[in-house]
Amino acid sequence: MSSSKTETQGYKVIQKEKLFEIRYYPAAIMAKITSTSKSYRDLGYSGFGKLAKYIFGGNSEKKQIAMTSPVHMDIGDSISTMAFVMPSNFKKDDLPKPDNAEIVIETSEPEYAAVITFGGFSSTKRIKKYRGKLEKALKEKGLTYYGNFRYLGYNPPYQLFGRRNEVIVALNADNFINHDR
């Protein structure tokens, strides 16, 4: 798998700030698992294999589905999720049923989000560091957000250089209404 040929989830950059971007993400179809994992490493180990098995033929049609990027991780204190974005040529009803009942196919809500990007290999510690930077920058700009800060990973584990990681959080609509920018 070459990351240069991997389909990337679409978004539109709305605004660029010094440390982050504001993006609009349209709805996307995702294969998702829920876990009690509380760290990047644990969620990665438990979730990735299950989702990979689904796209490599572990489904009702034994159909292979192309890998896309990024991998979405929402690491919570008690419940975490990992999701693969399905290729854009699929409609939800076109996807085969996962063999693993833990995998659900769902459509994400469209959202405006603040996103900070960093390189290298990711870890729980690095995700927390960039979450803190993003949170501080949002407060300084007076932007409000909701939900958990999530992690987006773009590269296969064997890619050593040119890695792309992001921390993302949904922005409240009131950031865009009645504000002169």
Image (tube, helix red, strand yellow):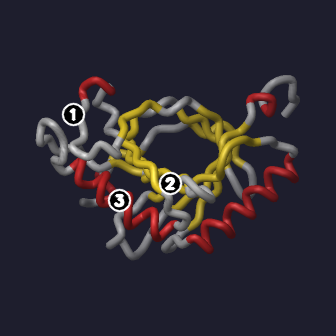
**Left or right: 56 in relation to 149:** left
Q: Secondary structure at mark 3?
A: helix
Near mark 1 (Cα within 10 A), the count class, few <14, some 14-19 or many ≥20, is some
Q: Residue 34: x and y, percent?
A: 45, 49
**Left or right: 104 in relation to 115:** left
Q: Quadrant of the N terminus?
A: bottom left
Q: Residue 70: x and y, percent?
A: 43, 51
Q: Callout 1, which amino acid?
A: Pro
Numbered label tally: 3
Q: Which residue is mark 2?
A: 73
- Badge 3 vs badge 2, beta-carbon distance below 8 Å: no
Q: Vertical placement of 73 versus 66: above or below?
A: below
Q: Residue furthest left?
A: 62
Q: Which mark is residue 48?
A: 3
Instruction: Name the residue: 54% across, 72% down.
Output: 123
Near mark 2 (Cα within 10 A), the count class, few <14, some 14-19 or many ≥20, is many
Q: Which residue is mark 1?
A: 96
Label 3 – label 1 distance at C-alpha: 18 Å
Q: Callout 2, which amino acid?
A: Met
For residue 91, which quarter of the picture? top left
